[in-house]
Image (cartoon, rainbow, N blue to C red):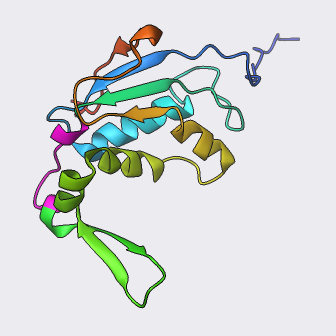
Amino acid sequence: MVAQPKTTVAKPGLVEQKWYLVDATDLILGRLASDIAMILMGKHRPEYTAHVDTGEFVVVINAEKVVMTGNKLKVRHYAWYNGYHRQKMESYAERLERKPTDLVTMAVKRMLPKNALGRHMLAKLKVYAGSEHPHQAQQPKLTEMGQKAS
């Protein structure tokens, strides 16, 4: 009889969570958001379990300096309904000017699971427009994300 390797299942509260710091200066929004979503979900860990939060905390600084390829800043729009007869629309460039942290937050939010666990994961994302952040005590580790795989 051959011994089978054991499968480990992560348990809530027993997974150590680290803090990562990401500088979004001149990074492409979609690539950055997909890397952040993987870290928040915990898919980079060998003990990833779909129904348990095995992800880490991510602090994003310089969100106002994120870039998009092509003409997407002018062409793409955020649309939402506010209760009146028509939708409100705003281009990505206008949103970047008005609320620079929203571009990163919304891009990551749409890549996470659409349930209570996804909302819990999104709460571990901290996005700041400038280079200052209040999470120095957690000693976040500077990490390269959003780079094109070559």
Q: Is residue 99 above or below residue 20?
A: below
Magenta segment: does it hold 45? no
Q: Which residues are magenta?
A: 63-73
Figure quadrant of the C terminus: top left
Q: Residue at 67% of width from left, 17% of height from top?
A: 15
Residue 83 place in picture, x, y as percent: 48, 82
Residue 5 place in picture, x, y as percent: 75, 14
Q: Is residue 72 above or below residue 148?
A: below
Residue 99 place in picture, x, y as percent: 28, 51
- The image quadrant of residue 23 is top left
Single out the residue that lies furthest toward the right.
1
Q: Residue at 40% of width from left, 13% of height from top?
A: 140
Left or right, 140 with reference to 112: left
Q: Is residue 57 above or below residue 106?
A: above
- The image quadrant of residue 72 is bottom left
Q: Residue at 29% of width from left, 46% of height from top?
A: 30
Magenta segment: does it hold 64? yes
Q: Residue at 23% of width from left, 54% of height from top?
A: 98
- Frontmost residue, 11 versus 120: 120
- The image quadrant of residue 118 is top right
Single out the residue that lies furthest toward the left.
71
Residue 136 place in picture, x, y as percent: 38, 12
